């Protein structure tokens, strides 16, 4: 079974036992984190003041990002993303260094646990550097990885490579630790994580901090890519804004201008209702992906091709029909996601494994209709 796994790269001469002792010896762990997996350049400084087995509220000292301008490309262009990382990463790190906690404590000033900035201020040196190691666009990842390695070597601290999808699965626990003091992070393990974005679609069984076996993955494209491509086909030219590359968001606004009050969604109650194609008054219908199989897979290429055929056969489609097609584009894809989630829950229940929480994360998770379905 595939699984999401972290990877740690410790500095030369620092074994696991020594690294563990380093972690335990610090009452407050401080990290500088870098993310460059796609078109966002992000840097953060996070501190965990927990010690003695007690959980304390984490402290976010710095969290800034810059997004590449891909408006001219109707989507993310790798070269534009890399150029943006190279232009903005150093400035963001400079801001993060200024946000590091002051090194005025006697326990900090001993030894080499501090760094001096160009303005003469002494700051606490991060205990380790965190960086996204993948998955993502290779060239973009390289910018962040090379920078993080340089910082780790210069400061002589460990480097922690973070799996992008594992980070999505653990984000709710990070947010929880930041918002609630003296309480264990939530949700508690185990739980299911549905990771949905422009590049990934997977269902993960989050059992522990570093244990995330993948239950379901896509066999072709990701759901976010399917929705973006469908949006460019379905949205009328008068509505489609080429300068906003969040085409899925445009599609949601077009289909549901009044938000949740326009959803009118009723879930299928039987397997027959689930796989039945809902033919519209214009004569077309969209197929539920993998309707004839119960295999634990996701697929969006077939329904994406169906959307393309409908739009190409009716270039003069009126707005009423386009709105209905936009709704179906999302309904079919979201029900496809939900069917595999239910199948996974049933399988885990049969194996006497209790799951109380479903985490939905990734860019597509912001879609309100998905959360309703």
Image (cartoon, grey):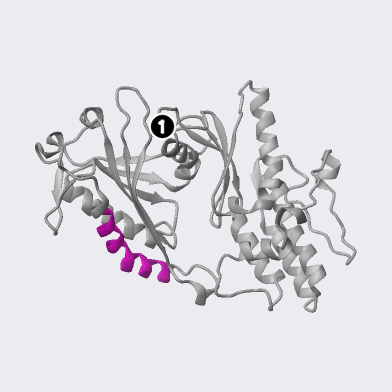
Structural crowding at the residue carrying mark 1, measured as other residues with C-alpha within 10 Å and reported as few (<14), some (14–19) or many (≥20): some
Secondary structure beneath dot 1 equals: loop
**Given the current orientation, which residue lies at the most extreme left position?**
111
**Given the current orientation, which residue lies at the most extreme top position?**
352
> Which residue in the structure is indicated by mark 1?
181
Which SS type dominates the magenta stretch?
helix
Can residue 221 be seen here? no
Looking at the picture, tell me which residue is in the foreground, 15 or 371: 371
Q: Position of residue 221 (x, y in %)?
A: 60, 57
- The magenta stretch spans residue 19: no
Question: Residue at point 79% right, 49% down?
Answer: 265
Looking at the picture, tell me which residue is in the foreground, 299 or 100: 100
Looking at the picture, tell me which residue is in the foreground, 177 or 199: 177
Quarter of the image where one finds residue 226: bottom right
Say left or right for 34 vs 254.
left
- The magenta stretch spans residue 82: yes
Q: Position of residue 115 (x, y in %)?
A: 15, 48
- Up the image or down, 282 lies above or below 154; here it is below
Quarter of the image where one finds residue 139: bottom left
Looking at the picture, tell me which residue is in the foreground, 372 or 133: 372
Q: Which residues are magenta?
A: 79-96
Question: Residue at point 70% right, 66% down?
Answer: 254
């Amino acid at each position: 079974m595939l699984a999401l796994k972290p990877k740690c790269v410790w500095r030369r001469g620092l074994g696991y036992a020594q690294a563990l002792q380093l972690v335990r010896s610090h009452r407050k762990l401080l990290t500088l984190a870098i993310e460059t997996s796609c078109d966002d350049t992000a840097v953060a400084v996070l501190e965990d003041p927990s010690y003695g087995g007690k959980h304390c509220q984490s402290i976010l000292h710095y969290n800034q990002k810059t997004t590449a301008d891909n408006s001219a490309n109707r989507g993310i262009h790798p070269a534009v993303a890399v150029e943006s990382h190279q232009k903005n990463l150093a400035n963001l790190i400079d801001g993060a260094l200024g946000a590091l906690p002051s090194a005025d404590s006697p326990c900090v000033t001993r030894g080499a646990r501090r760094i001096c900035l160009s303005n003469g201020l002494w700051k606490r040196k991060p205990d380790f550097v965190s960086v996204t190691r993948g998955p993502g666009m290779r060239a973009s990842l390289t910018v962040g990885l090379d920078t993080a390695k340089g910082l780790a070597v210069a400061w002589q601290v460990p480097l922690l490579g973070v799996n992008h999808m594992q980070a999505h699965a653990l984000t709710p626990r990070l947010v929880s630790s930041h918002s609630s003091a003296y309480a264990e992070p939530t949700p508690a393990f185990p739980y299911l994580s549905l990771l949905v974005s422009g590049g990934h679609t997977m269902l993960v069984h989050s059992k522990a901090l570093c244990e995330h076996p993948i239950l379901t993955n896509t066999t072709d494209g990701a759901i976010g890519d399917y929705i973006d491509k469908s949006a460019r086909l379905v949205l009328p030219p008068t509505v489609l804004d080429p300068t906003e590359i969040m085409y899925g968001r445009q599609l949601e606004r077009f289909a549901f201008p009044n938000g949740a009050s326009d959803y009118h969604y009723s879930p299928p109650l039987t397997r027959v209702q689930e796989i039945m194609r809902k033919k519209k008054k214009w004569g077309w219908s969209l197929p539920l992906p993998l309707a004839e199989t119960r295999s634990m897979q996701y697929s969006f290429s077939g329904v994406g091709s169906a959307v393309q055929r409908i739009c190409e056969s009716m270039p003069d489609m009126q707005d009423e029909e386009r709105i209905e097609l936009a709704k179906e584009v999302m309904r079919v894809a979201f029900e496809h996601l939900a069917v595999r989630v239910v199948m996974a829950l049933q399988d885990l229940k049969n194996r006497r494994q209790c799951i109380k929480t479903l985490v939905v994360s990734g860019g597509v998770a912001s879609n309100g209709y998905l959360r309703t379905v």
